[in-house]
Amino acid sequence: MKKRFLSILAFVLVLSALTACSGNNDKAGSEASGANGASPAAADKKPFTIAFDNANDVYAYCVKVREYLKQAAEAEGMKVLVANGAGDVKTQNDQIDNFIVQKADLIASISIDLDGSVPAVENAKAANIPYLSLLTHVNTDGYIYVGSENKQAGEVQGEYLAKVLPQNAKVLYMTGQTNDQQYVDRKAGLTEKLLKARPDVKLLAEQSSDNQKDKGMSLTEDWMQQYPQFDAIISQNDDAALGAVEALKAANRLKGVVVVGIDGSDEALKSIEAGELTMTVFQDAKSQAQAVVDVAKKLRDGEDPKSITDILIPFKAVTKENVSEVK
């Protein structure tokens, strides 16, 4: 009985040792590979985070930029945080402060105000978080700019109109908000290439449509009451231009009136194909969004933010003749 007991005890001890070795090997293997077969460092590493603050989700172009940005960033394994400034610079600045608290790796924003957005840039700099201003400039330094030069958008409009408008043409001008640098730059380009190049062209009125379709429509309705004849309506974005088209159609006055916008929104391209909107200045949302992600990749790979230069993407005139090239 004693021999039998010792044999059983020995067997139990050997079995326990084998089980322990197996468990240790499994644990070691698990620790070496991580939860998904990666190393512990790779498994625990947080994804690079882009915090994007939109100027205003009511603008179709801004939404398009946001969606392209999310797609391109997520394809690179990056995380994207999103907020909507809703056209209010204080709201946007507060949201950006929240992104700073969350320790985003890059803050990208369609900055709302030339001067009002300065605190957002400065706060990001103080936290050593790179700030990228998309589409709009800010009245300070130390940030990266990605987008198109807004003066060029006005120049493209002006060059086109200078060619197609009749002698002594009368034009109406829909603008964005006057505290927006886009407004200032686009007007400067239009003035240089149309109003100065063609002194015979008369600017009947200039008024803000807030770049919104419904306001573009109501403003055009008012203008039709005030001005019995005009040759063109120029808008600083497509949404308001499309509102002008709708108002002119409803009054049976679209024929003979040149209507131009800026952005190259999907709706604007369809309107050009239909022979309604005359021309838009195409702004490449997809390339702009990809440029933001390209900057993020450089930062993720350890490049010094100060060595990254601004990225400029040119505008392009789109009419019925070449609309198929950008669709």
Image: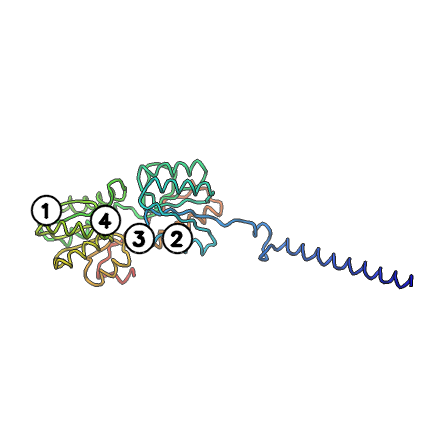
Q: How far apart, in angstroms, are the residues tagged by discs 4 and 2?
A: 23 Å
Q: What residue type is labelled 2?
A: Leu
Q: What residue type is labelled 1?
A: Asp
Q: How far apart, in angstroms, are the residues tagged by discs 3 and 2?
A: 12 Å
Q: Could you tell me which residue is drawn at 32 percent across and 37 percent down?
A: 116
Circle 1 residues within 10 Å: few <14, some 14–19, many ≥20? some
Relative to 302, 31 lies left or right: right
Disc 4 vs disc 2: Cβ atoms closer than 8 Å?
no
Q: Mark 2 points at which residue?
A: 69
Q: Foreground mark, 1 or 2?
A: 2
Q: Could you tell me which residue is drawn at 10 percent across and 53 percent down?
A: 166
Secondary structure at badge 4 equals loop
**Residue 61: assigned label:** 3
The image shows residue 47, relative to residue 304, as above or below, that is below
Query: Considering depth in this image, is 253 or 250 the residue closer to the camera?
Result: 250
Circle 4 residues within 10 Å: few <14, some 14–19, many ≥20? many
Task: Assign the C terminus to one quadrant of the image.
Answer: bottom left
Q: How far apart, in angstroms, are the residues tagged by discs 3 and 1?
A: 34 Å
Of pointers 3 and 1, the one earlier in the residue sequence: 3
Q: Name the residue under label 1.
A: 200
Residue 106 is drawn in which quadrant? Answer: top left
| Residue 230 x %, y % | 11, 51
Relative to 278, 2 lies left or right: right
Count of numbered circles in the view: 4
Q: Mark 4 points at which residue?
A: 236
Q: How far apart, in angstroms, are the residues tagged by discs 1 and 2?
A: 44 Å
The image shows residue 157, relative to residue 93, as above or below, that is below
